[in-house]
Image: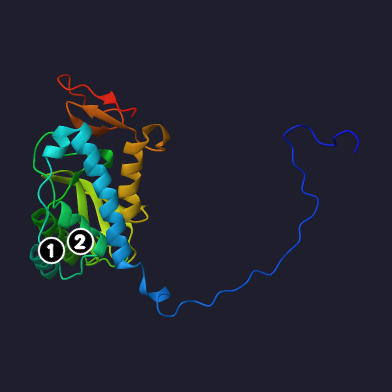
Amino acid sequence: YGSPQLGEGQVQIRSVEAIQMATVEPDVQGDDQGPDPHLEARQVTAAWQRIEAWLRAHAPASYASLKAGASEGEISALEDTLGVRVPAGLKALWSLRAGVHDMRGAGFLLDDQTLMDLDAVAAFYRQQMLLQQRNRDDEFPTWRPSWIPFCSFWVDDRSYGLYLDTDTGQLCHFSRYAERWPKYASLTVYLEEIADALDAPSLASGSKPGLAGGALVWGPPTHPDPQNPSVPYTG
């Protein structure tokens, strides 16, 4: 066959041929109905259970901060207060754990944020909708009725955090400066990213998990605590 015409590790494409891809008729019953709520609930539940199992084994301070889950009646009452339906995934999460206690270790979500409880969700939502009524700017809204706050900087500090856009399913960033932008494709993606980083920290593409005095922290601490120094978790 003679000597090779290309150097080692090189590939040459000599021709390209177009082909007709088979078309698939859309599923009229399912395509326009959005994600399967039962699948979403199962995915969120599975991801959260992975996170909680890790906290129980490695971060007792963070695990101790978890509140009990909310009842179906409590979540329904919140829906009545907000005037919006809580998606299946968020409902599944709240049924497992409805927020955290104000204590060290509570900020174990990405960016060291805390899971908001239902009272905080309702209070913050009302506050933001009141600001929107005063603002009256539909092009650059302060808040929309379909936005449900999910986590915040701290239990009693909602300077910034994440909300679930029930129209798109995305988790979006909010801040006190009216900054709003999509950050995660869904609640499932967000929780699975956390769970995957805990299971395989060396493969995490973003913030790396660490431990500080029995609490889960992410990345180098912004305000190091000399009494509880942060140590990277390597698995």
Q: Mark 2 points at which residue?
A: 91
Q: Sequence-wise, which precedes: disc 2 or disc 1?
A: 1
Provide residue 224's location: percent of width, then percent of height: 21, 24
Q: Nearer the viewer, residue 219 or 158?
A: 219
Q: Which of 226 and 34 is in front in this view?
A: 34
Going 16% across and 57% down the picture, which residue do you hit? Answer: 95
- Dot 1 crowding, Cα within 10 Å, few <14, some 14–19, many 20+: some
76 relative to 219 in the view: left or right = left
Provide residue 155's location: percent of width, then percent of height: 12, 44
Residue contact at pointers 2 and 1, CB within 8 angstroms: yes
Residue type, label 1: Ile
Going 21% across and 37% down the picture, which residue do you hit? Answer: 55
Q: Which of 165 and 144 is in front in this view?
A: 165
Where residue 75 sits, quadrant-wise, is bottom left
8 relative to 80 in the view: left or right = right
Going 11% across and 40% down the picture, which residue do you hit? Answer: 65
Quadrant including the C terminus: top left
Asked which secondary structure carries label 1, the reply is helix
Q: Residue 75 carries which label?
A: 1
